[in-house]
Amino acid sequence: MLQAIGLTSTPRRDAPPAVDDLTFEAPPGRVTALLGAPGSGKTAALRLMLELDSGRGVAYFRGRPLHRIPHPAREVGVLLGDVPGHPSRTARGQLRMLCAAAGTPATRADEMLEVVGLAGLGDQRLGTLSVGMDRRLGLASALLGDPHTLVLDEPAEGLSPRENSWLYGLLRAHAAQGGTVLYATADAKEAARTADHVVTVDGGRLVAD
C-alpha cells in the first residue's frame, strides 16, 4: 500500500503551492494512474512522495516513509524523466553502477536488460539511445532492486503504440504479483485504458478518486 497524506509543496513566490493538501492511496495488486493536465502538480506530488523536494505531509510505502526504509531501491523503483548518466556510458555500465549503489548483484543488470527488451543493446552508449530505448532503460533501472512499489512519471512518453502496449503489460504483471504501481499521465484515455484506479489532480488538489 502506498499512502500519500496531506502532501503540500513549499509555496512559490506570488503563486499557490504546486501541491496543496493532497491525500490519496495506491493499493497493492492494482495499477493506479495519477491523472492531470500539464502543470496540475503530478510531478511535484511524486517528488514530494519520494522526499526529493521540501514541503509538508508524508508518503508511506507499506507503512514507512522513504527515509525510514534501509534500502529504498529495494522497496521503491522510480522513473522520473530521462535516465541520468554520462552519454558515453553504456546501458549495461549504467545499470551495473546503479546495482552497486543499491547493493544488488551486478548480474541484475543483464537480467533487467532482457526483461525490458534491451538484451542485445547492453553495449550501446546512453547518448545514442532513442526515446523508446531510454524509457526502457529507465524502467530497467526502476526494477533493479526488485521493488514492491513502482513510481513512474509519464512512463509512456515518446513510446510507439507497440511499446506502449508492452509497457502496460509489464506494469500489470508487476501488479498481478502483488506489487503497487503508481504512474503519472496527462492522457485521460490512457488512464482509462490501462489503470485499475485513477486519481485526478488539478491545481495541486485532489478533484476525483
Image (cartoon, rainbow, N blue to C red):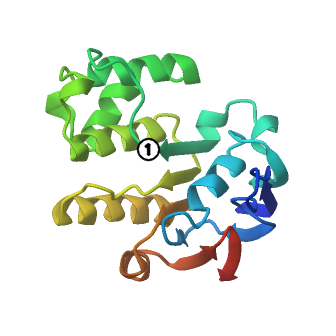
Q: Please, is residue 46 above or below residue 37 in the view?
A: above
Q: Is residue 152 left or right of residue 111?
A: right
Q: Secondary structure at mark 1?
A: loop
Residue 60, quarter of picture: bottom right
> Looking at the image, can residue 29 be seen?
yes
Q: Nearer the viewer, residue 1 or 182?
A: 182
Q: Is residue 107 left or right of residue 202?
A: left
Residue 140, position as x, y percentages in the image: 38, 39
Residue 146, position as x, y percentages in the image: 51, 40
Residue 63, position as x, y percentages in the image: 81, 54
Residue with the mark numbered 1: 81
Q: Nearer the viewer, residue 22 or 148?
A: 22
Q: How many marks?
A: 1
Instruction: Tell me the residue at 67%/82% (across/down).
Output: 207
Quarter holding the N terminus is bottom right
Mark 1: amino acid: Gly
Residue 188, quarter of picture: bottom left
Q: Please, is residue 75 above or below residue 119 in the view?
A: below
Instruction: Tell me the residue at 72%/71% (across/down).
Output: 24
Q: Please, is residue 65 above or below residue 137 in the view?
A: below
